[in-house]
Image (cartoon, coloured by chain):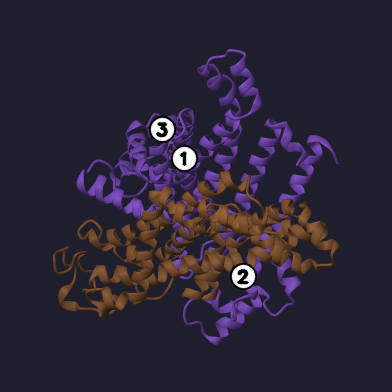
Amino acid sequence: MSSMLAEGLAKRTGETRNGTPGPIRFFRHEILALASAIVILASLGMMAFAPWISPYPEEGAGLPVVSHQLLAPSSVHPFGTDDLGRDVLSRVIFGARVSVTMGVMVTLVAIAVGVPLGAASGFFGRWIDEAMMRITDVFLAFPPLLLAIVFASAMGRSFGNAMLAIGISWWPWYARLVRSEVLSLREQYFVDAARSIGVKDIKIILRHILPNTLSPVIVQASMDIGSAILAGAGLSFLGLGVRPPIADWGRMLSDGRAILLSHWWVSTFPGLAIFVTVLAFNILGDALRDWFDPHMRTRRYVA
Amino acid sequence: MRGLYGYIVRRLLLAALVIVSVGVITFFVARVLPSNPAALYAGSRPTAEQLQRIREAMGLDDPLPVQFWHYLGDMLHGDLGVSFRTRQPISTELGRRLPATLELVALGTVFALLIGVPLGVISAWRPGKLFDQVTRVIAIGGVSLPSFWLALLFQLFFFGRLRLLPLAGRIDNIVSLEHPIRQITGFYLIDAAATGNWVAFKSAALHLVLPAVVLSLYSLSLAARMTRAKMLEVLSQKYIVAARALGLSERTIYSRLALKNAIIPTLTVVGLSFAWSITGAFLIEVVFNWPGVGKYVADAIVTVDFPVIVAVASVVAVTYVAINLAVDLLTSAIDPRVKLG
């Protein structure tokens, strides 16, 4: 078939060139994923426009208002105020900046480190592969959060350190994932074909192999962002995240603990924000995985 | 080396290598990375002399390999250092707190399996139908919930509103004074039951409910999803199709053939959930004021008691490796195909 005919057919059935159904069909079929995507976009919007959409932006950023301490939720303060008189709704909106950025950045760092290492390991094989497997074994041997706690304690509490701390424990998954994909891709005929006409190894990896590892990485990443947000919140709950007065959901939960029974709103709403955001990312990731899975077996490779 | 023995030996060597590497990494993060490691061990506002004394005591001016050698040697001898805050040896404190955490983690894992595995099995019976969908939602919700938030909500509801379950702690203070539990294993449930101390047993059990349930939620969701996936995978195998063709009823196929094979990944699930629960327990112990290892570390973080943080991290990491090793070996003993891997 000529490529023009293939393209025309593909467009009509809603498929992209490599046979995976495109995004429009995906969102039409999976309503839940659409809802999640909307929630995620909303949280991204909250992050970007926090000063403009929160009712009390200075309080959101950390300004205490002594006269309004610990007010119950009302029409003036829908989520109430905290122990420093700050509007909890504004704090939650500002808190999205730290938490969601943490989740996304951690995942990006893990991908940036893990994918190339995994690809190299799977492609070149032999001792590079063995070494990489042992190294990932070691990092995977640490229970989640533990290495992050030691690292953040040693290097001081800050956003960057917390991000690095969690990222260290995250990258081995991607290395392993990409490695196993590359191992099977390596045997494909188009790799031999490219080699035979003299294409250098590095170009084969970049141009032919990596694009085909994209879908499992995307699926893993979308689920990981949720877990990364949870991990970041856990770290700040323990006191290892950003320093006050920067709004951060985990720390807000921890701060409200002492007054939980009498003033339930201070801890409840930040926790709700964490839950809804992580849920959205997880549902999206789950739907993406189901969507890609049956089609992965029959797709044509981008060669 | 071939065969089961070869696999065991290889696995043990790998575990040993990983443990040493864990030591290297914790050593690296604790001593090499920070700009002034002595300050970390000195607490707040140390004087110059204090710093110098600590530098000498820790051997920080020695070459790195020598430092590491001493560090490893200390650990292997059970000397995990001294807590800065309490000036007590860390190993004794850890020994005292370990049963509390283990009791919590064990109960959480039991809950997770008792509820999660049947959920997965029943979901796979009719995939796509209502029960399956509901389980899927529960499972995704379970892994999305911040455990510390759920713990707070439980406290609010079951103690604050309903006064049904206790707020925090392992046992009621008055009960522990009037009916003290004789310490045999350190597990309150076992010790109280063994000595017939039913008042204390009831109090300890009530205190265990909320933390264990919160802890079990994540592993429960994992267990349900993994069991379901494994059951579906097994059901699509050829021998199931053959059994159907031979006329065996769906019920028999499901219970006799599919179920047995799906039990194997349950071991992996146990290992995974146990491992996750170790760090999950940290956060839950903080919320419920549970006197375990997790709270020990959490307090150490707040007071920047660095020796405790490093020591506990090493111990927990080694435990983690040991558990994974045990799970792998058990799995290979049961499933002959794994030995070749």
Q: Nearer the viewer, residue B133 or A276?
A: B133
- Badge 2: few (under 14), some or many (20 or more) residues near its Cα, within 10 Å? many
Q: Report which residue position mark 2 lands on.
A: B29
For label 3, the SS is: loop
Q: Report which residue position mark 1 lands on.
A: B187
Sequence-first disc among 3 and 2: 2
Q: Mark 2, chain letter?
A: B
What separation in Å lies between label 3 and label 1 (alpha carbons)?
A: 42 Å
Q: In percent of the image, x 16 and y 67: which residue is there?
A: A71
Sequence-first disc among 2 and 1: 2
- Left or right of A118 on screen, residue A16: left
Choose top left, top right, bottom left or bottom right for residue A236.
Answer: bottom left
What separation in Å lies between label 3 and label 2 (alpha carbons)?
A: 50 Å
Q: Mark 1, chain letter?
A: B
What separation in Å lies between label 2 and label 1 (alpha carbons)?
A: 34 Å
Badge 3 and badge 2 in a common chain: yes
Circles 3 and 2 in contact, beta carbons < 8 Å: no
Residue B75 appears in view:
no
Choose top left, top right, bottom left or bottom right for residue B172.
Answer: top left
How far across and down, in percent of the image, does residue A162 sit?
50, 70
How far across and down, in percent of the image, does residue A163 sit?
51, 70
